[in-house]
Amino acid sequence: MTDRTISLLIVDDHPVVRDGLRGMLASEPGFDVLGEAAGGVEGVELALRLDPDVVLMDLRMPAGSGVEAITELTRRGVRAKVLVLTTYDTDADTIPAIEAGATGYLLKDAPRDELFTAVRAAAAGRTVLSPAVASRLVSVVRKPAAPANEALSAREHEVLELVARGTSNREIARELFISEATVKTHLTHLYGKLGVKDRAAAVAAAYDCGILG
């Protein structure tokens, strides 16, 4: 991700939360809050009009739920990445949101630096999942008969840890002094050993079985 300013839209039904998020983001260089919405319906309308890089989306709102909004944004092919920011981490909340197309899922008790990092990662199209949420997603994203007896190599473990931090393939290659092609090879092996198909599922499975803690 370059140093360009990341534009945001805040969707939350609580004015105090919106004010707090706006103030927090305004205090950090590189963020620009374009607007706020109090519900999912208004959030979709503003996202279409303002074209933000990232939408910070609450889930349970009277004027249109977050999942409905994410589904509609995905259907319309909106460019913005949706980062769910909510107090709820139950299966009934997390799984539909991710399935609807959310790029990431963060809880509102996350430290501000974690939020800033998550917004930057989401803007770059990288998956962001808090550990508590990642472990809940395992039952859905991991294949039932995932092989559990293949140990990860030291290098695969390094790659996995960087993936969990939202690091891109290019950045992983740079940090580990290997080529992007080699990173992709390690990821392929990781997916096979964990019985998953993508980065988010690999992180979720790794938290679930204790590889990441």
Image (spheres, rainbow, N blue to C red):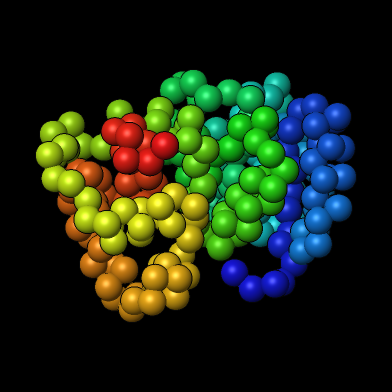
Location of the N terminus (image quadrant): bottom right
Residue reaching furthest to the front: 154
Q: Is residue 210 above or below residue 122?
A: above
Give residue 77's position: percent from left, percent from top: 53, 56
Who's the residue at 80% across and 32% down the image?
17
Left or right of 49 on screen, residue 78: left
Where residue 194 sits, quadrant-wise, is top left
Left or right of 6 on screen, residue 76: left
- 114 and 67: which is toward the camera: 114
Give residue 212's position: percent from left, percent from top: 38, 41
Who's the residue at 40% across and 31% down the image?
135
- 59 and 207: which is toward the camera: 207
Give residue 162's position: percent from left, percent from top: 43, 57
Q: Is residue 63 above or below residue 43?
A: above
Who's the residue at 36% across and 53% down the image?
160
Can residue 92 be seen in the rendering of this structure? yes
The total number of labels drawn is: 0
Who's the residue at 23% across and 60% down the image?
188
Location of the C terminus (image quadrant): top left
Give residue 103's position: percent from left, percent from top: 51, 48
Where residue 106 sits, quadrant-wise, is top right
- 181 and 72: which is toward the camera: 181
Can residue 201 be seen in the rendering of this structure? no
